[in-house]
Amino acid sequence: MNNEKKALEGIKQSSGTEQGEYGIDEFVSHHLEELPPSYWEEHIGTSKPTNDDVIGLLVLRSKWDEEEVYDFTLPNEVTDYVVSVSFDEDGVIESISMES
């Protein structure tokens, strides 16, 4: 499994945990409040997506070459926020956080 897939899997697994509180869960709740129902209708087919629905929409925005850091966000550049996943030198996830 490549690190991009590992990062997405780590994001999914952190949802609903203490680690996810200031990472993916904060990202999801912020965007559920801020984005109009029409955005969710267009991308998911419902105006009331679940956390898993939102996580399933994440796309890679950037990868930092000098470090193993992957930034994921929502499609169509609707936000400046990303969920940032960093790996240590052994390929283990070090942190998952929401960044702007």
Image: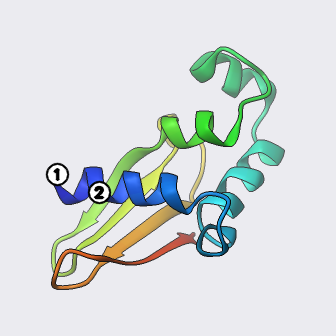
x 79%, y 46%: residue: 34
Q: Is residue 30 left or right of residue 56?
A: right
From the viewer's perspective, is residue 18 above or below residue 8? below
Q: Is residue 75 left or right of residue 1?
A: right
Q: Nearer the viewer, residue 77 or 55?
A: 55
x 50%, y 62%: residue: 83
Q: Nearer the viewer, residue 43 or 13?
A: 13
State if disc 1 and disc 2 touch (CB < 8 Å). yes
Instruction: Report how far apart the C-alphas of labels 2 and 1 lie in the structure.
Output: 6 Å
> Which image quarter: residue 70?
bottom left
Q: Quadrant of the C terminus?
A: bottom right
Check disc 1 and give the amino acid type: Met
x 72%, y 48%: residue: 31
Check disc 2 and give the amino acid type: Lys
Q: Is residue 8 left or right of residue 74?
A: left
From the image, tell me which residue sits under label 2.
Answer: 6
> Could you classify mark 2 by the number of other residues whose Cα lies within 10 Å: few (under 14), some (14-19), or many (20 or more)?
some
From the image, tell me which residue sits under label 1.
Answer: 1
Q: Position of residue 98 (x, y in %)?
A: 57, 69
Q: Position of residue 86 (x, y in %)?
A: 34, 75
Q: Position of residue 19 (x, y in %)?
A: 59, 74
Q: Nearer the viewer, residue 7 or 59?
A: 7
> Which image quarter: residue 50?
top right
